[in-house]
């Protein structure tokens, strides 16, 4: 999962570089920008699919799954905005998504130790009035 997260981050970071090349006059960079957008979304989809069972098995915090899912939705909207030439949405959404990526990476890359509630290991819960035979 960490490999996919790093590949997603690298592909994601390539996007503004390709956009900058296009804005600098390299018209062919827009095709690369569009192709790479598909790669970014695909990698985020894989990341989200991998994050779900990892979260359910308590290998990752829930925030890793919810953040990757949120990024996946935002990336879908981002692709639509780009192809529809809605730059008023495409550019600020890219900035917001960069914040999402900055939030996601530590969640995925740091070792995760689930919090154990105090006294929950081997504890027996007694219900009032639940005596033997009642």
Image (spheres, helix red, strand yellow):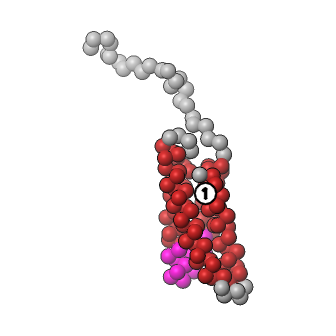
Quarter of the rendering occupied by the C terminus = top left
Task: Give the residue displayed 48% in from the left and 43% down from the top.
Answer: 56
Q: Going by the image, does 78 lie left or right of 110?
A: left
Q: Which residues are magenta?
A: 79-94
Outermost residue to the left = 134
Instruction: Identify the residue under disc 1.
Output: 4
Task: Assess whether residue 25 is covered by the magenta stretch.
Answer: no
Figure quadrant of residue 101: bottom right
Q: Which one is in front, 41 or 16?
A: 41
Above or below residue 128? Residue 94 is below
> Residue 117 placed where, x, y %?
53, 30
Question: What predominant SS class does the magenta segment belong to?
Answer: helix
Instruction: Examine the image and state in which quarter residue 36 appears.
Output: bottom right
Q: Residue at x 52, y 24 (%)?
A: 121
Residue name at image x 68 percent, y 77 percent: 18
Q: Is residue 85 above or below residue 100?
A: below
User: Horizontal and vertical percent for residue 108?
Assistant: 62, 50
Residue 85: x, y in percent? Answer: 54, 83
Res. 70 in view? no
Judge the density around disc 1: few (<14), some (14-19), many (≥20) Cα neighbours within 10 Å: some
Q: Residue furthest right?
A: 24
């Amino acid at each position: 999962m960490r490999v996919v997260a790093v590949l997603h981050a690298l592909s994601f970071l390539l996007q503004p570089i390709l956009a900058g090349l296009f804005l600098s006059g390299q018209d062919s960079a827009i095709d690369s920008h569009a192709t790479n957008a598909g790669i970014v979304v695909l990698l985020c989809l894989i990341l989200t699919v991998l994050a779900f069972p990892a979260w359910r098995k308590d290998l990752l915090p829930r925030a890793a799954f919810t953040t990757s899912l949120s990024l996946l939705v935002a990336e879908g909207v981002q692709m639509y905005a780009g192809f529809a030439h809605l730059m008023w949405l495409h550019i600020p959404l890219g900035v917001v998504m960069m914040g999402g990526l900055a939030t996601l990476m530590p969640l995925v890359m740091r070792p995760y130790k689930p919090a154990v509630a105090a006294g929950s290991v081997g504890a027996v819960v007694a219900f009032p009035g639940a005596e033997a035979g009642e």
